[in-house]
Image (cartoon, rainbow, N blue to C red):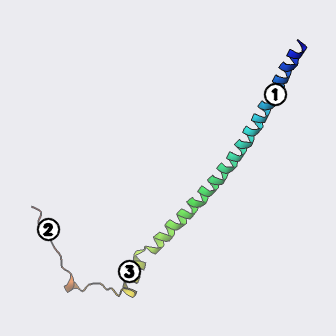
Amino acid sequence: MKARSAATVFILLAMVVGSAIGVVYSKHKSRRLFIQLQELQQERDQLKTEWGKLQLEQGAWATHGRVERIARERLEMRMPRPGDVVILSIDSR
């Protein structure tokens, strides 16, 4: 009977130690995942900031004045003379 109770105590002790190791592992993994989540959120915030800057830059590059200046200077384009403009009308029958 003494051997049986010693075996029971040993089994219970092993279960407690196994449970404690499981809790420690679970807590460690939870902390690692939380740190990874924080890093990803920080990266997301940085990407959002960069996206906003790129949108502003795109808006600055596409202004009408800039496009017109480049068309005149680099492409040697000009406004058409009044005699060169032809207005077409579409018959709406």
Classify mark 2: helix, strand or loop.
loop
Pick the residue in front: 71 or 1.
1
Residue at image mark 1: 14
Q: Disc 3 and disc 2: Cα gap in Å?
A: 29 Å
Q: Disc 1 and disc 2: Cα gap in Å?
A: 91 Å
Q: Residue at x 35, y 88 (%)?
A: 76
Q: Is residue 74 above or below residue 56?
A: below
Residue at image mark 3: 68
- Is 49 placed left or right of 74 in the picture? right
Pick the residue in front: 7 or 23.
7
Q: Which amino acid type corresponds to the residue marked 2 in the rendered image?
A: Ile
Question: Which of disc 2 and disc 1 is earlier in sequence?
Answer: 1
Q: Is residue 65 above or below residue 54?
A: below
Q: Which amino acid type corresponds to the residue marked 1 in the rendered image?
A: Ala
- Is 65 placed left or right of 91 in the picture? right
Q: Which amino acid type corresponds to the residue marked 3 in the rendered image?
A: Glu
Residue at image mark 2: 90
